[in-house]
Image (tube, helix red, strand yellow):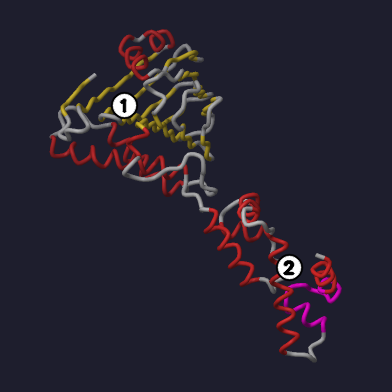
């Protein structure tokens, strides 16, 4: 382990650690690695390959931990203790075959992006093949004052590879710094790394659309496209980048449904059109207002009267 003093008073010491360990037995019993894993509350439970190779570059900056890891096929366990329950972990795996499991919440994005929110449940990490990982751990408090993240309301759209790649590339480069790098180079990188950590958490969790905004957006779609007979809740959900269930929930919170609002708007449009053009055939009115046929228009009128 190599340590150098950070220039930021609120971050404390910057610690650099580089592990290169070959062989299952050496990996499981390496003293330096065991000391680090013990302090981080992580531990290997199995290593599949007798000739397994672990490569890891790690950087500690106060409440932040950054790691670029070449992990062999293995299983690790994180039995979270009192000190680690406030930690947030984000992992980006460069290959399939890496999973994160827990009885507590785990945010999983395809193909291999994970966020573990604060909590006390044990977390198990498993790699079924050699896997390259970017791993970041930070205190939940480190997110306050920066990017606001709501772990209970995950964004519908997963992050894109184009968005994540520059961030993960920065972490890899940061973890590769050496102890003899000049402070004029390292100190600015520390601030950037902490911001990247917060950005990665927020990016993988995603920015959820709030319910009021979503309701208004759905209603604007209906008002704009009601005349299209192909207008559907599935189409609107896809256009807004959310699930059908999310759209239905937003409308339900306002005591209505998609079909009810669409029918009401089409009926009003049909009535206005007929009032302005008394001689217009009902079949034409039905086509122009999205009902498609005169029979569908009549059914909607009867249903509205019965209610």
The circle on residue 4 is none
Is residue 288 rendered magenta in the image? yes
The picture quadrant where one finds residue 264 is bottom right
In what quadrant of the picture does the N terminus appear? top left
Which one is closest to the eye, mark 1 or mark 2? 2
Q: Residue at x 52, y 59 (%)?
A: 213
In percent of width and height, residue 69 lies at 38, 27
The picture quadrant where one finds residue 226 is bottom right
Q: Please give left or right for residue 141 compared with residue 210 in the image.
A: left
In what quadrant of the picture does the C terminus appear? bottom right
Q: Residue at x 51, y 53 (%)?
A: 209
Badge 1 marks a residue whose secondary structure is strand
In percent of width and height, residue 193 lies at 28, 39
Q: Which residues are magenta?
A: 282-297
What residue is pinned by disc 2? 263
Q: Is residue 288 above or below residue 222?
A: below
In percent of width and height, residue 42 lies at 41, 18
The circle on residue 57 is 1
Which is more toward the observer, 58 or 284? Answer: 284
């Amino acid at each position: 382990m190599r340590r150098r003093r950070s220039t930021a008073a609120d971050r404390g010491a910057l610690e650099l650690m580089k592990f290169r360990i070959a062989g299952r037995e050496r990996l499981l019993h390496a003293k330096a690695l065991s000391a680090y894993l013990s302090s981080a509350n992580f531990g290997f439970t199995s290593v599949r390959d007798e000739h397994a190779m672990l490569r890891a570059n790690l950087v500690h900056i106060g409440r932040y931990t950054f790691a670029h890891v070449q992990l062999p096929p293995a299983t690790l366990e994180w039995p979270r203790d009192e000190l680690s329950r406030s930690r947030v972990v984000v992992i980006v795996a460069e290959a399939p075959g890496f999973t994160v499991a827990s009885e507590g919440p785990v945010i999983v994005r395809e193909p291999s992006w994970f966020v573990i929110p604060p909590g006390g449940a044990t977390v198990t990490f498993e790699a079924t093949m050699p896997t390259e990982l970017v791993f970041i751990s930070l205190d939940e408090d480190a997110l306050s004052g920066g990017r606001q993240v709501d772990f209970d309301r995950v964004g519908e759209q997963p992050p894109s590879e184009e968005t994540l790649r520059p961030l993960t590339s920065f972490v890899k480069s940061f973890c590769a710094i050496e102890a003899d790098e000049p402070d004029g180079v390292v100190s600015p990188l520390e601030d950037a790394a902490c911001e990247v950590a917060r950005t990665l958490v927020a990016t993988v969790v995603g920015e959820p659309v709030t319910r009021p905004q979503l309701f208004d957006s759905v209603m604007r779609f209906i008002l704009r496209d009601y005349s299209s007979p192909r207008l559907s809740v599935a189409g609107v959900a896809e256009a807004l980048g959310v699930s059908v269930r999310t759209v239905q929930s937003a409308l339900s919170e306002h005591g209505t449904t998609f079909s009810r609002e669409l029918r009401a708007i089409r009926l009003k449009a049909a009535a206005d059109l007929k009032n302005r053009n008394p001689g217009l055939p009902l079949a034409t009115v039905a086509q122009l207002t999205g009902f498609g046929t005169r029979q569908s228009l009549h059914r909607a009128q009867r249903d509205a009267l019965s209610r």
